[in-house]
Image: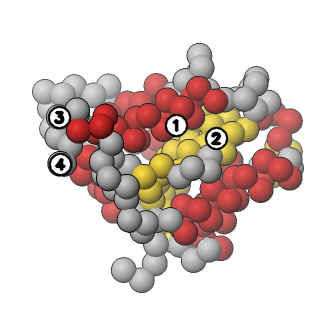
Amino acid sequence: MDHTHVIAIAGSLRDESYTRRALRVALDEAEAAGATTKLIDLREFDLPPLDADFDEQGDSAEFVTLVDEADAVILGTPVYHGSYSGILKNALDYCGFDEFGEKTVGLLAVAGGSFPVTALEHLRSVCRSLNSWVLPHQAAIPRVYNAFDGDELIDEDIRDRVERLGRDAVKYANIEPEPATFESGENVGADD
């Protein structure tokens, strides 16, 4: 492979999503670091609520392939009730160890209110249980309406964090993963 390929999954359905705007900033920085990138806008996929009795539903095969082919994934979510969005949860449910195992994952969360720590913690836990290597650096955007002017991320400190997330996704895309966690060994389908 000539280039690292980084995708960002936008866990928001809003037309004027701050999550998508922030992910574009991260992806621009990933491109500047030499990666090819793609923003996965979940509004463009038919992903009905997962029914585990079926192998494929709607556009799930296409979505899973995009995740599988990426070297690194940045997950972006608005905060809903202290956690990440249901649309992102449903999309992640279509994936598993094949798509996320030993893959580098970056995390980004936006909130209308205070610091979105629990949403990031919940995503980190899900990714670790899938044997992903989750970047230690994460980007959180509290009071997001103050951080943007249109599509421009004007808060310099937050912009630096989001840009670093994009760079780190490229820098650590091919890192040798840590040994499997205890939690991942308890999950059906995890590699030993």
In the displayed structure, does residue 88 sit left or right of residue 79?
left
* Disc 3: which residue: 188
Residue 187 x, y percent position in the rendering: 22, 34
Q: CA distance from mark 1 to mark 3?
A: 26 Å
Dividing the picture into quarters, in which one does residue 55 lie? top left
**Res. 59 visible in picture:** no
Tag 4 near tag 3, CB within 8 Å: no
Mark 2 and mark 1 residues within 8 Å of each other at the beta carbon: yes
Q: Mark 2 highlights which residue?
A: 19
Indicate the secondary structure of the residue bearing disc 4: loop
For the residue pair 46 and 28, the one nearer the viewer reads as: 28
Give me the C-alpha separation between circle 4 and circle 3: 11 Å
The residue mark sitting in front, 3 or 2, is 3
- The image position of residue 119, as x and y in percent, is 57, 29
Q: Foreground mark, 1 or 3?
A: 3
**In the displayed structure, would residue 79 be above or below residue 152?**
above
Q: Which of disc 4 and disc 1 is earlier in sequence? A: 1
User: CA separation, marks 1 and 4?
Assistant: 31 Å
Dot 1 falls on a residue whose secondary structure is: loop
Under mark 3, the amino acid is Val
CA gap, disc 3 to disc 2?
32 Å
Label 1 vs label 4, nearer the camera: 4
Q: Residue furthest bottom?
A: 2
| Disc 2: CA contacts within 10 A as few (<14), some (14-19) or many (>=20) | many
In the rendered image, the quadrant that contains the N terminus is: bottom left
Q: For mark 4, what is the residue? A: 192
Q: Residue at x 26, y 46 (%)?
A: 97
- In the displayed structure, would residue 192 be above or below residue 146? below
Tell me which label, 3 or 2, sits earlier in the chain.
Answer: 2
Amino acid tagged 4? Asp
